[in-house]
């Protein structure tokens, strides 16, 4: 019989201390394996282990020779067990997390291992961490993965004398946790969401739960957050550049069919007004000879594959039957290539993927994968959506229905579906319908196997479809016809990844226009207002409107209406990208027109012979990629890129 959950007061942990070291726990094994490489240098540092328990981490930290080491816990028995293991120089204190020991700015590193779930007041803990940490100090947090715990019904518990004792705990999303610490002066530097691997499998096997281990393959079991305390602002700093900018003398796309002459006045990242005449009192960027379009929205992307080559069968080989067949084959046939590219840090891959999007005028990306901390950094080159639920696909996720049910009603739910040509792929639509997953929240990526019958069902349920035509052609030698595409009521366009796609989102646009014959007006909506509606985006995204966010691109060429212009663009035609009014990319001619204070922080690269200034630390990205690949040429989505320098 299990005891009822109670508040996790000290006596609960006193009980747990009796068996804590004797009961094998794969979550702790996984955490120790994954946190250790993330530890900052400890030599000479002042370190605090919050919720140190019986000294599990204290012993590991001691060998790294910190300047001082303190462990705190709310349980006297836990601390007694720890004292028998650790060095005499390690300080142990009975304390709650609401009041941490030490003077202001006295610690360089704080570790909080499997603690946050037990805290009633996370805000107070964040305040205390900010107080005791020095500027640039590190905070490492680990805990059970909240989404997996909710989906699998995991609880905090232990067994004592044949009884299961549950520990009351709070369930907070990772986004919520990051937001709290951001408010209190911390920036997330690393988010790791590891799953069990072979070394943890032995624990499951010893407990007779090998099937459970196999079921959890690829499922994030814990999360690890590495945060850094922000440096204080320096007095006497140069004043910030003006937040006001005016774009003048460029026709403005107000819809797929209409241009308007005038000027765009931007303040604090938003469009304040669209004037007929230029406001001579406002800072001005003269765009004479250019045309303004809304920033594009990429409805399906895997940012981490920007540097990868194409992986699959040659054109003379038979097409795949479905995506599962392709996925299994490339991991068998191309395993050495995949292993080589995975040596590049994930954060580097994600940045390269963002630059691939930025170069073709994309300001907002739906990244169909876990939200890595790198994607939330304020200096990330594009906006990455994260307010949605998602699953990979029916074939790769047995928990798909549970994830869908756990997604808030006001958020979309994204998954790969009907990605293939066989009956199994086609039947996925009816399976999703039977699982009650096919409704207005569902965003189905690919839909290649759909016939008129499946599309009619999708339309009746109010679901959406994101198509990726060049990826489908590469894998299956087919894509949806013009007639079928036109019949989908809610449809958007995605670039997928360079592993299967032709290049970038504009390559997908030209495929729709030139090869499939889709109407330019529909194409325009598929990369602007369509995905904005599909993903519940606010702030005027996908349009150029007063009070809307200032996501804008400038192109030199014009092919008639805004829709026809967009349908004929190549990445080389996009010469300016603004994200919330901030210049993220510029061609050399437009860079020369920028006010000097808007040029700071931009570096120059050459992409397939075209030079572009990009707001990012490009030299670091080149060095990180080239140190692994050692190529004669570095390729981004199949195009050669070279680093040219900075101001």
Image (tube, grey):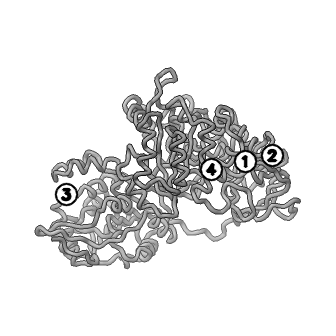
Which of marks 2 and 4 precedes in the sequence?
Answer: 2
The mark lying in front, picked from 2 and 1, is: 2
Q: Secondary structure at mark 2?
A: loop
Q: Which residue is mark 4?
A: 297
Q: Which residue is mark 1?
A: 576
Marks 3 and 2 sit apart, C-alpha to C-alpha, by 65 Å
**Relative horizontal placement of residue 499, taking residue 249 as reference (left or right):** left
Which of marks 2 and 3 precedes in the sequence?
Answer: 3
Which of marks 3 and 1 precedes in the sequence?
Answer: 3
Which of marks 4 and 3 precedes in the sequence?
Answer: 3
* Residue at figure coordinates x 69%, y 53% from the top left: 578
Residue 410: x %, y % from top left = 52, 64
The mark lying in front, picked from 3 and 4, is: 4
Marks 4 and 2 sit apart, C-alpha to C-alpha, by 21 Å
Q: Which residue is mark 3?
A: 24
Q: Which residue is mark 2?
A: 290
Marks 1 and 4 sit apart, C-alpha to C-alpha, by 16 Å
Which of marks 1 and 2 precedes in the sequence?
Answer: 2
């Amino acid at each position: 019989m299990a005891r009822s959950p109670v508040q996790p007061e000290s006596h609960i942990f006193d009980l747990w201390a009796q068996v804590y070291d004797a009961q094998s726990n794969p979550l702790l094994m996984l955490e120790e394996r994954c946190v250790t490489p993330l530890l900052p240098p400890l030599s000479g540092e002042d370190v605090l282990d919050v919720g140190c328990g019986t000294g599990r981490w204290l012993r590991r930290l001691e060998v790294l020779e910190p300047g001082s080491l303190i462990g705190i816990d709310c349980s006297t028995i836990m601390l007694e067990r720890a004292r028998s293991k650790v060095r005499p120089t390690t300080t142990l204190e009975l304390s709650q997390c609401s009041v941490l020991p030490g003077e202001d700015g006295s610690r360089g590193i704080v570790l909080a291992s499997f603690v946050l779930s037990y805290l009633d007041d996370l805000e107070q803990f964040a305040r205390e961490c900010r107080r005791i940490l020095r500027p640039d100090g590190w905070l490492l947090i680990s805990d059970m993965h909240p989404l997996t715990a909710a989906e699998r019904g995991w609880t905090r518990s232990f067994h004592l004398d044949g009884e299961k004792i549950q520990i009351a705990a709070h369930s907070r999303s990772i986004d919520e946790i990051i937001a709290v610490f951001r408010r209190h002066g911390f920036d997330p530097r690393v988010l790791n969401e590891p799953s069990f691997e072979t070394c943890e499998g032995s624990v499951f096997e010893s407990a007779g739960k090998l099937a459970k281990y196999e079921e959890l393959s690829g499922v994030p079991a814990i999360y690890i957050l590495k945060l850094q305390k922000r440096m204080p602002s320096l007095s006497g700093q140069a004043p910030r550049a003006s937040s006001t900018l005016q774009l003048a003398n460029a026709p403005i796309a107000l819809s797929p069919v209409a241009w308007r002459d005038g000027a765009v006045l931007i303040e604090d990242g938003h469009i304040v007004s669209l004037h007929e005449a230029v406001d001579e009192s406002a800072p001005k960027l003269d765009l004479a000879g250019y045309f303004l379009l809304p920033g594009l929205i990429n409805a399906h992307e895997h940012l981490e594959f920007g540097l990868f080559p194409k992986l699959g069968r040659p054109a003379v080989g038979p097409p795949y039957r479905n995506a599962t067949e392709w996925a299994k084959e490339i991991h068998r046939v191309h395993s050495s290539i995949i292993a080589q590219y995975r040596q590049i840090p994930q954060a580097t891959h994600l940045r390269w993927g963002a630059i691939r999007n930025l170069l073709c005028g994309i300001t907002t990306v739906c990244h169909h994968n876990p939200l890595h901390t790198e994607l939330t950094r304020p200096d990330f080159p594009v906006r990455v959506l994260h307010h949605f639920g998602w699953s990979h696909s029916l074939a790769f996720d047995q928990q798909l229905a549970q994830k869908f049910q756990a997604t808030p009603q006001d958020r979309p739910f994204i998954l790969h579906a009907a990605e293939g040509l066989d009956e199994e792929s086609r039947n996925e639509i009816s399976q999703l319908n039977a699982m009650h997953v096919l409704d207005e929240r569902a965003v189905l990526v690919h839909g290649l196997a759909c016939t008129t019958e499946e599309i009619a069902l999708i339309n009746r349920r109010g679901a959406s479809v994101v198509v990726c035509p060049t990826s489908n052609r590469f894998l299956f030698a087919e894509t949806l016809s013009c007639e079928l595409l036109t019949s989908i009521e809610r449809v958007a366009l995605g670039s997928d990844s360079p592993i299967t796609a032709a290049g970038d989102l504009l390559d997908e646009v030209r495929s729709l226009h030139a090869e499939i014959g889709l109407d330019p007006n529909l194409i325009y909506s598929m990369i602007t207002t369509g995905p904005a509606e599909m993903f519940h985006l606010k702030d005027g995204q996908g349009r150029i409107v007063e009070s809307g966010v200032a996501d804008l691109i400038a192109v030199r060429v014009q092919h008639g209406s805004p829709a026809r212009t967009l349908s004929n663009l190549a990445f080389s035609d996009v010469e300016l990208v603004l994200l919330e009014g901030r210049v993220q990319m510029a061609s050399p001619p437009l860079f020369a027109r920028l006010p000097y204070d808007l040029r700071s922080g931009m570096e120059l690269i050459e992409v397939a012979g075209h030079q572009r200034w990009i707001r990012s630390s490009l030299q670091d990205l080149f060095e990180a990629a080239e140190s692994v690949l050692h190529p004669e040429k570095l390729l981004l989505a199949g195009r050669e890129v070279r680093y040219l320098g900075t101001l």
